[in-house]
Amino acid sequence: MHRLSFPILSLGPLLLTACIPHQAERGEAAPAPTPPPRLDADASTVKLAEPEPVWTAQQVVANARMVAASTYSVQPGDTLRGVGNRTGAGSEAIARANGLTAPYMLRAGQQLAIPGGRYHLVAEGETGIAIAAAYGVAWRRIVDANGLTEPYVLRRGQRLLLPGDTPVHAPGIEQRAAAFRIDIDDVLTGGQPAVADNTPKATASTSPKPLPTNMPIAQPARFAGSFAWPVKGTILSRFGPGESGAKNNGIDISAPAGTPIRAAADGVVAYAGDKVAVFGGLVLVNHGDGWVSAYGHASRVDVVRGQKVRQGQVIGLTGDTGYASKPKLHFELRKDRVPVNPITQLPPA
């Protein structure tokens, strides 16, 4: 069995391929070809309250094992997880293959189809993004292969089915860095660390104190408020397809560098960092009921993962980090992971 262990930190800044606004800004010339990533240290520097995202903290061992498709005869006292441990397949995959639903009661003599494939054994603290990077496969494909749903928190000992074309041997560091891409959806669905059963849930705090790397963020209460403008300024790029045909999943607002960025509504910070290269400094806030707001191109990020924020609270400062050609704020709203035009949810400017 070939095993490879490496820190995800070695990947360096990760690139985000979705949600890149290419629409020409008002008063500017027609859009030029997409610029290459800005690699100079000064251009990408963001002052952070929490220096690294949680997915860089946990080493991932590429320990996937091949399991042959088979049929298992349930023995007295068997549980679904026990069957998974005996066969090497994921208990969730077995349940889906056999149409089982919670509480997954089994009966002696029952014949269970064991789905074949390669399964990764999840360790405590591992995130979906780190696991996907370890195998050089898009995280969203692992989500689809396993039917993962909200709140996308993995558990220690869970076996994740890898897509069928996942490389048998984990690719080299350079290959992973060149091939692996994430977007905001990946951060929202694959940024939570795996936990052991019966792990107490974190309580959101208003203090900018980072959570332990093996603790998922607290889910906010139901969203019952409304959204406010995160900054005031001229809209440079609007939601939807631009003149080039590329879709902007949010809006871009002109603001002088150093302008305070304010939370659009109460919520809990899901991500605060600069490893998504296109947006530079980026904050994602979970508001509950499937609502998430995103704030990109920040020069300073003042909040940390798991921190509770209030509407109007300063969460950072505007800048031109990432692929921004001038100081501005890229702002998105998402409902159930689907981008929504922020203008329809904000008060008149």
Image: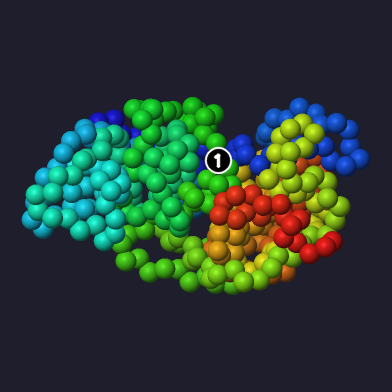
Residue 260 location (% of width, % of height): 77, 62
Name the residue located 13 percent from the left edge and 55 percent from the top edge: 107
Name the residue located 10 percent from the left edge and 58 percent from the top edge: 77
Which color scheme did the rendering employ for the protein? rainbow
Relative to 310, is 326 on the left or the right? right
Foreground residue among 12 and 21: 21
- Whether residue 78 is situated above or below residue 168 in the rendered picture: below
**Residue 284 shows in this picture:** no
Q: Secondary structure at mark 1?
A: strand
- Which three-letter amino acid code belongs to the residue tagged 1? Ile
Pointer 1: residues within 10 angstroms few (<14), some, or many (20+)?
A: many
Q: How many marks?
A: 1
Q: Quadrant of residue 321?
A: top right
Q: Quadrant of residue 178?
A: top right
Q: Circle 1 is placed at which residue position?
A: 182
Name the residue located 42 percent from the left edge and 56 percent from the top edge: 153
**Residue 129 shows in this picture:** yes
Relative to 287, is 23 on the left or the right? right
Foreground residue among 224 and 52: 224
Residue 46 location (% of width, % of height): 68, 50
Q: Quadrant of the N terminus?
A: top left
Q: Quadrant of the C terminus?
A: bottom right
Residue lying furthest right in this view?
A: 27
Name the residue located 73 percent from the left edge and 43 percent from the top edge: 240
Residue 191 location (% of width, % of height): 49, 51
- Whether residue 121 is situated above or below residue 289 in the rendered picture: above
Foreground residue among 41 and 314: 314
